[in-house]
Image: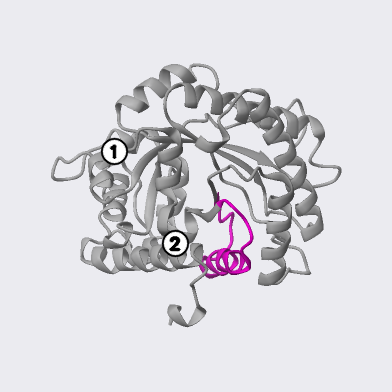
Amino acid sequence: MSLNTLEEIASYIVSDGKGILAADESNPTCTKRFDTIGVESTEESRRDYREMLFRSSGIQGNIGGVILFDETIRQNAKDGTSLVDLMNSQGALPGIKVDKGLQPIGDSDETVTVGLEGLDERLKEYSLLGAKFTKWRAVIKIGNNLPTDNCIDANMKALADYAKVVQDNGMVPMVEPEVLMEGDHSIEECFAASERSLKSLFHHLKENGVNIKGTILKPNMVTSGSTCSNQASIDEVAQQTLECLKANVPSELPAITFLSGGQSELLATAHLDAMNKIGGFDWKLSFSYGRALQAPTLKAWMGKPENIFIAQDALSHRAKMNQLAALGQWDKGLED
């Protein structure tokens, strides 16, 4: 795969309906997931699980990139092959999560993402380890008078500063301004918070001289809050999300790869498909799912070697369903 420019890398990841497998869970998050199936989380068990994911036949042709955690980008498969080489052989580009998590803003309920200190050095190492793209996540909460302008501005400025350093190191930055689903807020409130975040983000990206054509956006969809009594329909989510994106995202951006953000596997696929069926935009609209791709796989695996093929089939199926959704060709009947 000869991909020499940021634009080529970004375009490849989402070519032909391909999307991204988010496998960048921190070790504590992985422990929580493994606890649900009664598997101890160790360096070896995490390696075995992720090797199983990356060897799944459905990676080829459906997944264009995989976001990794620091531990994983350094690991080898059981046969000694590096996990990075394994991904490349499947046609999926290795990416890496580079932020250092959330820090409270003063004594408020809001946070800002940190990790700019030492970022240049970390990126140089990750590039040598084979990473082609990176991810940084900002978190925006909706609540009583939240989000504040201060929270949005601090997080979007950090995303833009990160993106510039990443491009200076020859990798594609994925910018993730996540408006959380948690809460009882309406879809209108989610739209407003998402719009404010996107406006601020692209203002700061432009101010920093970031090449938009070599950048990937990983946003939330515009949905009702998870505990809102009035849940928006699939069509309403698709329409509201597209309206928000069309008004605030430059057309030269090559790719928008949604986070699933706590949606069920089927809803995440249905929403993506509905947007692509509506159409009328220049960017590729695809997926960057973690739980919505992995949940059925984890449940099928249960930590048992004899379940590996069933678990891989579960991942391959979800990857194919989302690839079809990214082309607007999914149908619920394909899930039976």
* Percent of width and height locating residue 183: 74, 55
Frontmost residue, 87 versus 204: 204
Frontmost residue, 312 versus 244: 244
Check residue 295 in the rendering and tell me which mark sits there, or answer none.
Answer: 2
Q: Which residue is mark 1?
A: 2
Task: State the residue at coordinates (44%, 51%).
Answer: 14
Please identify, in this view, whether the residue under mark 2 or under mark 1 is nearer the observer.
1
Q: Is residue 172 left or right of residue 256?
A: left
**Magenta highlight range:** 257-283
Task: State the residue at coordinates (35%, 22%).
Answer: 125
* Percent of width and height locating residue 202: 68, 35
Frontmost residue, 291 versus 332: 332
Q: Is 198 drawn above or below residue 229 in the view shown?
A: above
Check residue 188 in the rendering and tell me which mark sits there, or answer none.
Answer: none
- Earlier sequence position, callout 2 versus callout 1: 1
The reply to whether residue 22 is visible in this rendering is no
The picture quadrant where one finds residue 38 is bottom left
The reply to whether residue 254 is visible in this rendering is yes
Element at label 2 = helix
Q: Amino acid at mark 2?
A: Ala
Quadrant, the N terminus: top left
Q: Amino acid at mark 1?
A: Ser
Circle 2 Cα neighbour tier, 10 Å, few/some/many (<14 / 14–19 / ≥20): some
